[in-house]
Amino acid sequence: MDRRSFERLVDEALAELPAWVVERIDNLYVEVRDRPPKDLDPTGEELLGYYEGVSLADRGVDYFGVAPDRILVFRLPHLALGLDEEDLRAEIRKTVLHEIAHHLGIDDARLHELGWD
């Protein structure tokens, strides 16, 4: 799948977010990259997404003038899963939800409890 088609699936996942989530998102952008940086995933094949920033739960009154938080979604590791388009769409959606949850302040332990890992 080419980059543009993959980005469209990421955009669809974002468009499907519930209104209450969209209303809470603050100072965040989402970026598609082919693979994760070596410092995050030395093989470049395992990490599907990454949240970088200060979660809403950790922001205080002194949070201002800060560069936007960023969610990275990695195309090639998703494609390496060998999924058909429907299952790939579902996996991308799961990745986007997982990283948005980190932006909202939900940690990995809670995501596991919710079945979002």
Image (spheres, rainbow, N blue to C red):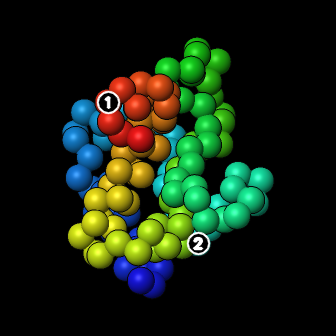
Mark 2 sits on what residue? 34
Q: Residue placed at 28% from the left, 75% from the top?
A: 85
Q: Which mark is residue 114?
A: 1
Separation (CA) of disc 2 from disc 1 = 28 Å
Say which residue appears at 46% left-offset and 44% top-offset: 99
Say above or below: 35 vs 41.
below
Reading the chain from its start, which is encountered first: label 2 or label 1?
Answer: 2
Which image quarter is the C terminus in?
A: top left
| Residue 106 placement (x, y as % from top left) | 44, 27
- Amino acid carrying label 1: it is Leu
- Name the image quarter holding residue 37: bottom right
Please report the residue visible at 29 percent of the width from the left and 76 percent of the height from the top. Answer: 84
Which quarter of the rendered picture does the N terminus lie within?
Answer: bottom left
- Please give the name of the residue rendered at 46% of the width and 74% of the height, measured from the top-left corner: 79
Tell me the mark number nearer the camera, choosing from 2 and 1.
1
Q: Nearer the viewer, residue 99 or 70?
A: 99
**Residue 113: x and y, percent?**
36, 26
Q: Residue furthest bottom?
A: 2
SS under mark 2: loop
Going by the numbered disc 2, the residue's amino acid type is Asp
Residue 91 can be seen in this image: yes
Q: Is residue 69 left or right of residue 89?
A: right
Q: Residue 46: which quarter of the image? A: bottom right
